[in-house]
Amino acid sequence: MGGKAYSLEPLPISPVQTKYRKMGDRFPVPESIPLLEQLRVYEPVSMSGQPPVVWAKAKGFQVSDHWGNTWLDWSSGVLVASAGHGRPEILKAIKAQAEKEMIHNYCFPSQIRTELSRKLVDLAPPEMDKAFILTTGSETTENAIKLSKAHGHKVGGPDKDVFITFDGAFHGRTLGSQLAGGSPALKAWIGKLDPSFVQVPFPGDFRVKDKSFGFFEKALADKGIKPENVCGVMTETYQGGIAAFLPVDYAQALRKWCDKYDILLIMDEVQAGFGRTGRMFGFEHYGIVPDLACFGKGISSSLPISAVIGRSKFMDAFEPGSMTSTHTGNPVCCAAAMASLDIVVKEDLPGQAATKGEILMNALSRIADAHPDNVLALNGKGMVAAVQVGSGGRLDGNLAWEIVRNCIVRGLLMFSPVGPEGASVKISPPIITPEDALEEGLQVLDEAFATALDS
């Protein structure tokens, strides 16, 4: 299941000029069409699902093109720029590291990798005492699968091999991460699926009525899965497409269940980590500590870098040289991450997200109340939220797409609904977005809802 490709025909729109937004009278911008057409020639069609906004500059909480248009950014570049785009501190760190004439070193030791590993461990709960630095979120979830299977085989033999995830989950686009994903349409290309990957209903989904942990156990029993044969359970801290969290008592019961049966509990924090939800780590909302946690996106607010942080008894499963990565701890990416994490701590981004999240969720609740027949669910914490839309109790991806399009032409940048979560309007501004800019964006969203529903 995919999304729509935007038309490249420039159409008239109402000009916009506010404190934070500026839009001309046509969209897509006529001057951008030759570049956009070249992209459609030279790139796979899969790359044409996002709004045709040609980024020329991204600074703080705004994105501008080459032709004088400026958007409030509610995408954070898919939740990367938590500390804001183009932060001077991060740019300075990147330049300083590049000027040291060391921009790649494979797995050979470096000071900057040492510093970042220590910083990640220092930020994490004491039980999580080792960090493995990687490149992408998919790489971290693949690594978590690998560590879970290795532990299962060690303590329970080859039968302790079942890896549990949740319906609707997204853990990446590589083979293993999509086997673990919970969207059948996204892994239809695989064909014959590995039966050791098993999904169960996600209790944060409004369509799942039984949210008790007993339902989790029943779902496994109905599939013929014995707890003794499970090696790992992985869940997104909040399910990315719909920004929905587990019930707290469910998460705590899951932690106890994993302990009872010697199962690794993995929290996929790729979208949640480093302040986004109003806590340093999203799993803190549950009052639990996972065995492994996967991080990416907001770790650097810029360059591609990710990490698995976990308990050494599980992280040390493989002998020297048998669990590595070509770009592990890339020096320039490490420098960006160090600078970004300093901002997270010094500017208290978790606290900012918690405060601004109240403004965000209160305004979204008012929008939901104004459209009770079309807002089917509203989820979120901190500076991440999602509004699931439809009619007659059924999700409607076309409505979500139209709401986002109406935001884009008004100067509010969001990423387009795609895939199984396509009936969800996802909201994820940079955490540093000022309150008045956040309120301006919420007014735009309110207008976009009304226009889409009136059309």
Image: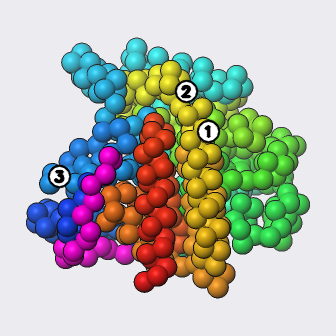
**Labels 1 and 3: the sequence-earlier one:** 3
Residue 175 in picture, x, y percent from top left: 49, 59
In the figure, 8 relative to 299: above or below? Answer: below
Element carrying mark 2: loop
Q: CA distance from mark 1 to mark 3?
A: 33 Å
- Judge whether residue 320 can be spotted in this image: no
Q: Observer-nearest residue: 339 or 56?
A: 56
Residue 322 in picture, x, y percent from top left: 51, 34
Name the residue tied to disc 1: 354
Magenta region, residue range: 4-21
- Judge whether residue 68 can be spotted in this image: yes
Is disc 2 in contact with disc 3, using a CB cutoff of under 8 Å?
Answer: no
- Please tell me the numbered disc located at residue 68: 3
Residue at image location 64% in from the left, 79% down from the top: 373
Residue 127 in picture, x, y percent from top left: 72, 25
Task: Name the image quarter holding residue 211.
Answer: bottom right
In the figure, 127 relative to 47: above or below? Answer: above
Q: Is residue 376 left or right of residue 420?
A: right
Q: CA distance from mark 2 to mark 3?
A: 33 Å
In the figure, 7 relative to 30: above or below? Answer: below
What kind of residue is marked 1? Ala
Residue at image location 46% in from the left, 62% down from the top: 445
**Labels 1 and 2: the sequence-earlier one:** 2
**Quarter in which the C terminus is drawn:** bottom left
What kind of residue is marked 3? Gly
What kind of residue is marked 2? Asp
Q: Is residue 360 left or right of residue 40?
A: right
Task: Name the image quarter holding residue 168.
Answer: bottom right
